[in-house]
Amino acid sequence: MKLLLDLGNTRLKWAMAAANGWSARGAVAWNEDVANVLTQSWRALTHPDHVLGSSVVDEVREAQIQTLIAEIFARDVTWVRTPAQACGVRNAYPEPHRLGVDRFLAMVAAHAEGHTPCVLAGIGTALTLDALAADGQHLGGLIAPGPLLMQQSLLGATVRVQTDYRAAIRDIADNTPDAVASGCWQAVAALIERFTRHIANQHPGKAPRLLLDGGDAATLLPLLGLSAELAPDSVLRGLLIWAHSHPAPASP
């Protein structure tokens, strides 16, 4: 049994991996009582043989989770850091560690599952875009604010614009809340479409699959003018593939 951890900007997602898939899974937002929520979820689980983590948060939060894992399971966390290459994926960054490990692991999952060539779009606090060639070569990517962060930024930088996150997403809006929400969501959709078309034009051949993950992926999907599909839990799936390729020493 392997406990896999995905520490994202907004929340922590976890899954217990058994031979036939996830035997348990869950998530907790950082603005919740993280220790209490995880303790209640994990106390009833079989102790894992290995705990593997992906993190884009600070060392304080990593240490908090490490302490909790030690208290509940008496295990250390193996934190995956972005390499130059692994699991058939080659990192395009000259300084490999500067690529978010979540992005690298999403590419690992896509490559292992035969989804290349592809464009991976992570739609959460940030929008991340990465292109992956059929042979596992990372072609590079882009980062922009996610749709909700765009709305927050607009609200914080203006005086008279008032936004409502429950506003409707429309093609053309006739009120300010809808106009703000619609403009931000459509801007994200347009950037994804532009990036995907650019990759297809620059690398002719088999058209890249467009894979969406992240907390806002399902909302964004119907706004796209390109064929796309949801690829949930890509970081956790990448972690499991990593675990199989980098077996841990036997626990005492």
Image: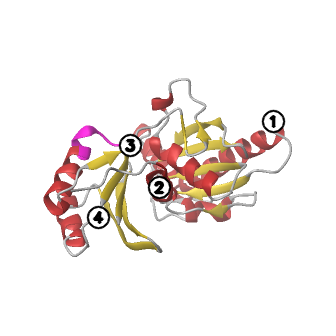
Return the residue at label 4: 48
Q: Where is residue 85 in the image (x, y as percent from the top left)?
A: 55, 36
- Figure quadrant of the C terminus: bottom left
Rate crowding at label 2 as few (under 14), some (14 to 19) or many (20 or more) other CA atoms within 10 Å.
few
What is the quadrant of residue 112 in the picture? bottom right
Rate crowding at label 3 as few (under 14), some (14 to 19) or many (20 or more) other CA atoms within 10 Å.
some
Return the residue at label 1: 202
Residue mark closest to the camera, 3 vs 2? 2
Spatial separation of the CA atoms under disc 3 and disc 2: 22 Å
Return the residue at label 3: 56
Q: What color scheme is it?
A: secondary structure
Q: Residue furthest top?
A: 94
- Are discs 1 and 2 less than 8 Å apart at CB? no
> Mark 4: which amino acid?
Pro
- Mark nearer the N terminus (1 vs 3): 3
> Mark 3: which amino acid?
Val
Spatial separation of the CA atoms under disc 3 and disc 4: 23 Å
Q: Which of 180 and 210 is in front in this view?
A: 210
Q: Where is residue 99 in the image (x, y as percent from the top left)?
A: 50, 35
Tell me which residue sits at (60%, 50%) in the image.
Answer: 121
Q: What element carries label 4?
A: loop
